[in-house]
Image (cartoon, rainbow, N blue to C red):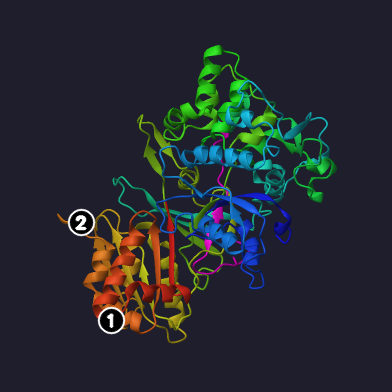
Amino acid sequence: QSCLPGERSVVFVVSTTGQGDPPDSMKGFWRYLLKKDLGARWLEGLRFAVFGLGDSGYQKYNLPAKKIDRRLLQLGAEIIIEIGLGDDQHPSGYEGALDPWLLSLWESLNKANPSLLPRITDIINPNLNYLGDSKIEVIYYSCNDAPPDSVVSDSKKLIERARLMSPALKFHSDGEPQYMLKMVTNQRLTKEDYEKDVRHFELEDPSSAISYQVGDALEILPSQNPSAVNAFIERCNLDPDSYITIRAKGGDEVSNGSLLNGSMGRIKLSTFVALTMDVASGSPRRYFFEIMSHFATAEHEKERLQYFASPEGRDDLYQYNQKESRTVLEVLEDFPSVHMPFEWLVQLTPPLKKRAFSISSSPLVHPNQIHLTVSIVSWLTPFKRTRQGLCSTWLAGLSPNEENLIPCWVHKGSLPPPKPSIPLLLIGPGTGCAPFRAFVEERAAQSARESTAPILFFFGCRNEDNDFLYKDFWLKHAQDKGVLSLKEGGGFFVAFSRDQPQKVYVQHKIKEQSARVWNMLCSGAAIYVAGSSTKMPADVTAALEEVVRQKGGEAASGWLRKLERAGKFNIETWS
């Protein structure tokens, strides 16, 4: 970052995490850019371009990209072209904005300095018949060559080794799983015949306590279906029992850690695929189709793949691939003449990612357990093909107390744990109630030994009979001297959106209870919102602003912004 003033042209590609937060890899850089001693001429002479990766379904769409764009200008840098905003909601995904933005970038760079891009015509009109080299090479060992010490019995170490070796996961490794947890409860919360399947899972470490706080998230590495992994290996003509090492072309292993030096760097091919390559749920990117076209021996397949890889074929590729959630395995099966070398498959297959879930238990009550509230994901594609979420479906299929162990990492969530003395205003429709089950459970445990502030909770679902998640739990804490009881200054209010002709949502209940909401805010309450990222956060924010305007006559948005700056207005949403 300190070398930045010495650069002439820099392109920043910035993703978005959480509620408009920068990715972890950017946080140190961003802190550096905010240093007060960097003057308005610090980046004079630097030209830059920014492309953001975001989702317009979220309130703070592409915020990190917009912030870095603004800050670089403040520091004296000059823009090459206007900021580009990639949107996952676009019919062609982020590539809908990226393609024209890239074209404009190359042309602007070439105009300013023709010697910078001597092969500009190759960039603007790429030759799809030319294939460069893959960036990695795979070294194979027969199972007889594998030394005894390359067999790892510790599953934590095996996961770490495989994921360190993957080029796609090189910058996303959290080391070995912190915990290998056992499923001890798998309970359906919604009515058996109801279309939505929401589960309550209890995961346990039988031998020791788990270190976590309310508001944290649990990341889980899902297991892929072994038959899908075997089908992929067979389709690619690979030997599942061979051992491999992966390294950068002309260099060392992908990771330079001592773990991968020498024979300890070898791993069974089938294990590597199962732990790092998402072969049966992730959709490949456009470049995958471009590389496939080079290995197609049937002319009609080559032509179709080249069309998909071209700007003209982008929308048709989106319909075939992303809209249908086509997997790598299915794409390879649709083009039987293609035989891609494993090097390219390792490089281009979507990585097997961990999935994050809000924790719905308190460590004060369950020190060696973590509870999760999970919607089992299933949907129909435009061609009426049923698709299922990899992780949620796998978890739903696990029987309690089986030998299966679940690789887990605890991560700090975007909902900071509140002090017992702070009143809470919680809004969590649907599975958005998950972190608030933890908050209520924790405060109930705290209230048994010290005085605590009340909680006002607004929950929402479709029907009282079908999907009133944790009904008994909430009602128990809303009685007598419970932390949600009206007697104690709290409250529990539910919006059943489909139980009457007109739809009723949590924002309507907030307005109905405006006096209670205002009293809570006046007593210094912290606001927490969790749930779907679509319209709910904006509608809830608008309802809160209306309450502040009506009751306090205040500038409502300024009031809420003040709370946000003080860390007392927190939102956690997911799509």
Label annotation for residue 61: none
Q: How many marks?
A: 2
Q: Residue drawn at (75%, 46%), measured in percent from left and top?
A: 255
Q: Are marks 2 and 1 in contact (CB under 8 Å)?
A: no
Q: Residue at x 42, y 76 (%)?
A: 563
Residue, disc 2: 503
Q: Amino acid at mark 1?
A: Gly
224 inside magenta stretch: yes
Q: Which residues are magenta?
A: 205-227
Going 55% across and 25% down the picture, which residue do you hit? 332
Residue closest to the far top? 299
| Whole-percent x, y for residue 285 in the image | 54, 35
Residue mark closest to the camera, 2 vs 1: 1
The residue labelled by disc 1 is 552
Q: Quadrant of residue 550?
A: bottom left
Q: Secondary structure at mark 2?
A: loop
Residue 233 vertical position relative to residue 38 in the rendered view, above or below: above
Residue 248 at x, y percent in the picture: 76, 38
Relative to the observer, which residue lies in front, 88 or 221? 88
The CA distance from mark 2 to mark 1 is 28 Å
Report the amino acid beneath label 2: Lys
| Residue under the point 75% across and 33% down | 137
The local crowd at label 1, few if under 14, some if 14 to 19, many if 20 or more residues have their Cα within 10 Å, is: few
Q: What element does badge 1 sit on?
A: helix
Most distant residue in the left direction: 501
Measured as percent of width and height from the top left, residue 131 is found at 67, 25
Which quarter shows the N terminus? bottom right
Instruction: Please tell me in which quadrant of the rendered image residue 75 appears.
Output: bottom right
Q: Main secondary structure of the magenta part?
A: loop
Taking the image as drawn, is residue 480 in sight?
no
